[in-house]
Amino acid sequence: MSRFSSSRRPAIIYGIVMWAISFVIAGFLIQLGGSIIADVPLSSAPIHQTDFVDQVAEETLNEKIAGLRVAQRDGARDVEDLQAKRAASEQEYLSARTSFDNWIKTRSATESQDQNPEVIARSQGLDALNAARNDARRELQAAQAGQLNLSRQEEDLHSEQSALHRAAYAPYQKALRAETLKIFLIRLLILLPLLLVSAWLIARKRQSAYWPLFRGFIFFSAFAFFVELVPYLPSYGGYFRSTVGLVIAGVAGKYVITAMRRYLEKKKSEESKTEAERRNMISYEVALKKMSSQICPSCDRSFGSKKDVISDYCVHCGFCLYNNCSSCDARDNSFHKFCGTCGTQKADLDLTASPSA
Ligand SMILES: [Zn+2]
Ligand SMILES: [Zn+2]
């Protein structure tokens, strides 16, 4: 708008207030909708993968593992005891051996024959100690092997357990998908009526005096759609979301194309009408707004830049843009109702000044 605004001042304020009211309505509706959604039992308890593990098999495994752990603890004590026993027998044998060796040495020095039976008895004693030492060693080794066996069994049980948990993955995923779909459908059920009403309002009520109120409702629906519905769209590996996006873009595209075609047809049919008929179809405010932006109010094409000398008639459709006052002959916007120079009412000028189409 260059020189002056075409709208009356209160009309401008009315427009601003109505936008504010639209937003306030949308804000309160969003709050109300949020409370409703929060109160609707949208989902049951959250699902976990552990819910799908075979409970009986899991318990049996846990019992077996617990049993093995007890056995391992007992086994560890036995190993400790046997280690002590082995060390003692080792010690006993070594000291007996040392004393025998010393005794043999002194005996060799004296060479007394009558000591033979004692040699036999002593070496028999030493043999017994050695046997006991070997037994203790074997016992310890057996106990250690037993422990190793137990820990291997436990490892096997643990891998059985993880196999059991892995088996739960597929049914868990399936249940998760079903749950996601259920939540989405419940939300859709709540929000679909809103979206349908909004679509109907946009299609039918744009010219209504109550449009600013409807506009608030439409903002609310749009918010609900993007915040309460879109994030809950089931993904199905991206297929579903992409498909929904494509459908929405397709519908929007078709709507825009149809609207544009309708607009062009309307303009074409307007251009075949007489200047007076065309002038009657244009509202005063809209005409002044378009004239100040140098757009022809009839055909919506630009009629020149500010540098150009602006002609009286639209070069595209022949519509009369500027004419001269019948009283003072000053050139003026053809939509002005009064001459800007002498103040004469121009009510009849439009028809007389127009060239016949
Ligand atoms: Zn034009
Ligand atoms: Zn005049």
Image (cartoon, rainbow, N blue to C red):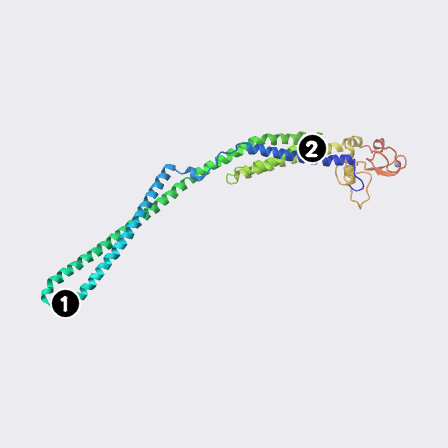
Q: Which residue is mark 1?
A: 107
* SS type, badge 2: helix
In which quadrant of the rendered image does the N terminus lie?
Answer: top right
From where the camera sits, is residue 298 visible?
Answer: no
110 vs 70: above or below: below
The quarter of the displayed image where residue 14 is located: top right
| 1 or 64: nearer the viewer | 64
Q: Residues within 10 Å of mark 2 (few under 14, many from 20)?
A: many
From the viewer's perspective, tell me whether residue 232 is left or right of residue 280.
left
From where the camera sits, is residue 331 visible?
Answer: yes
Residue 246: % across, % down? 58, 38
Q: What amino acid does circle 2 point to?
A: Pro
| 288 or 12: nearer the viewer | 12
Residue 215: % across, % down? 67, 33
**Could you give the CA–CA distance between mark 1 and mark 2, rounded to whole angstroms?**
127 Å
| Numbered disc total | 2
- Ligand 2 sits in quadrant: top right
Q: Residues within 10 Å of mark 1 (few under 14, many from 20)?
A: some
**Residue furthest to the left:** 114
Q: Which residue is mark 2?
A: 212
Closer mark to the observer between disc 1 and disc 2: 1
216 vs 92: above or below: above
Residue 214: % across, % down? 67, 31
Asked whether the residues under the numbered discs 1 and 2 touch, taking CB atoms below 8 Å apart as contact, a structural biologist would say no
